[in-house]
Image (cartoon, rainbow, N blue to C red):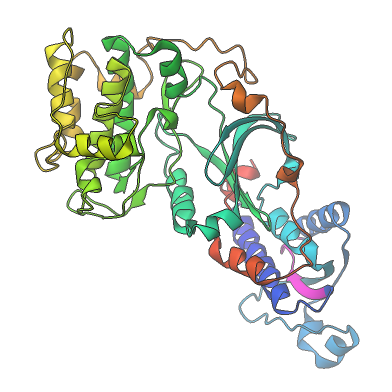
Amino acid sequence: MKRLAKWYCTLQSLVHFFFKCIYLLPQRSNVQFLLPSFPHSSYQEICLKLFSQLLSIHWRTIPKTSILCPSIHKNNNNSIKLSTQSCPQLTFICIFSLQSEDLIEVYQILSAIEKPTDFAFLKVIGKGSFGKVLLAKHKMDGKFYAVKVLHKKVILKRKEQRHIMAERNVLLKNVKHPFLVGLHYSFQTTDKLYFVLDFINGGELFFHLQRERCFPEARARFYAAEIASALGYLHSLNIVYRDLKPENILLDSQGHIVLTDFGLCKEGVSCTDTTSTFCGTPEYLAPEVLRKQPYDNTVDWWCLGSVLYEMLYGLPPFYSRDTAEMYEHILHKPLQLRPGTSNSACSILEGLLEKDRQRRLGAKEDFAEINCHPFFDLINWEDLDQKEIPPPFNPSVAGPEDLQNFDPEFTEEQVPHSICQSPDRSIVNASVLEADDAFIGFSYAPPIEDSFL
C-alpha cells in the first residue's frame, strides 16, 4: 500500500505542474501532455477508465521507450518531453488531450480531493466575512458536513490569505482533541475555497445565551472546563486562538463544547513568545491588545474569563454599545462582580480578567494553573476529556438534519446556485493567477492509504 501511495503522489505532483503550466499558454485552447500511470497494470486500467467516464479525455498508452527514441517520439507528435531517469520503474506513459478547464478537475480526481459537485448543499447555517457555511450531504457516503465556502476575491482584497492558510493548518492539527471541530477535506475552485468540517448541530453558545440570558454556575463551569481543555491543547501546539467568543463555541448533539473558526489563530507562539497583530472581537479584546503591546497566549485566558462572565451574568464584563467607551472600560474600569456569585467563581474571574497579563491566571504555567483552580475542583479532567461527564444541558437534536438550534435568519435563506459553480477556466487573467498562487497547498484529503481500506 505504501508503494501505491508513492505513485499516487507522483501523479498528483505532475498534474499540478501541468495545471499551473496551462496559465503560461492562455492562447492555447487545448494542451497535450504526458502523464505516468500506476506501475501495476490493474491500477493503470482503473485509472484510465475513471478518466474516460468522468471527463471528455482522449487517451492512449505507449511504451516509455518511445519517449527516449526521438524518431518514435516525433511520430507520436508529442511536444512535451518527460525524463524517466528518476522513475525507472515506469512501464507506460499516458497521453492526454485536455481542454484547459478540465485540468483542475483532473488534479482533484488524482489527489482524491473532493469537488463541490460531490455534495448536495441543503441549507445555509451561517455567514462570515468571506462567505457562508452550509449544511451539505456527501453524495457518495451520505454523511452530513458543514461546508465553509469562502470567496477568494474578497480574501485577496482584504489581504487575509495568510489567515485562511493558518486556519487550514490549525484544523489539520485538531483531529485528536474532543472539543475542537475536525476537518475532513479542503479544496478549491477558480474563485472559491471550501472547508468540509464536522457538522455540529447543537447550536452556538451565543444562540443558547440569547434564549436563556445566562446559565447556572454548574453549567457555566462545565462549558468553561471543556473550553479551557481545548485552549490548553492549542497552546501545547504553540497556537494562540485569539478569537474566543460565544459565536465560535458550538454545542454538539449531546451538549459538549466544540470550538470552531480558527481564522485568527497564530501559530508558532510558545509560552515565552509574543506577537503583536491587532485582531479579535471588540467585546473580548485583552487590554494589552488594545494598547497594541506585544502579547502572548494569556490573551486566550482573558477571553475565557470574558466568556465565563457572560455565561454567568448575560453580558461581557466591560460591555458598552459605544465601542470607544467599552475599550476605555477594558483598559481602566475595575471588574464588577454581582452578589450571589460563589467565592471560587469570583476568584477565577478576577484571575482571568487581570489587566496585567504577567499577573493573569495562566501566565506562569498556562493550562496547569487553570485546571488547578478551586472553581474546577468538581471537575475530573481525565473524565472530561473522555466525554464521560454528562453535559448539564441536552440540545435535544432529533437527527443529523435537525436545524432547530440554528438562527432562522440563516436557514430560511435560499442556497445560492453559485456554490457549485465557477467562472469559465478558459478565461485566464491576472486575478485568476494571483488567486492560484495565493492558495497553493490549500487542498487536503485524508491519507491515501485510508481511502483504499
Q: Position of residue 298 (x, y in %)?
A: 21, 41
Q: Is residue 291 above or below residue 257?
A: below
Q: Position of residue 79 (x, y in %)?
A: 80, 84
Q: Is residue 91 visible?
A: no
Does the magenta run of residues contain 189? no
Q: Residue at x 83, y 59 (%)?
A: 48
Does the magenta run of residues contain 36? yes
Q: Residue at x 56, y 22 (%)?
A: 407
Q: Residue at x 76, y 41 (%)?
A: 417
- Quadrant of residue 223 in the image? top left
The overriding secondary structure of the stretch rendered in magenta is strand
Q: Is residue 247 above or below residue 342?
A: below
Q: Position of residue 177 (x, y in %)?
A: 39, 33
> Over which residues does the magenta segment extend?
31-40
Q: Is residue 102 left or right of residue 360?
A: right
Q: Is residue 133 left or right of residue 202?
A: right
Image quadrant occupied by the C terminus? top right
Q: Position of residue 449 (x, y in %)?
A: 59, 47
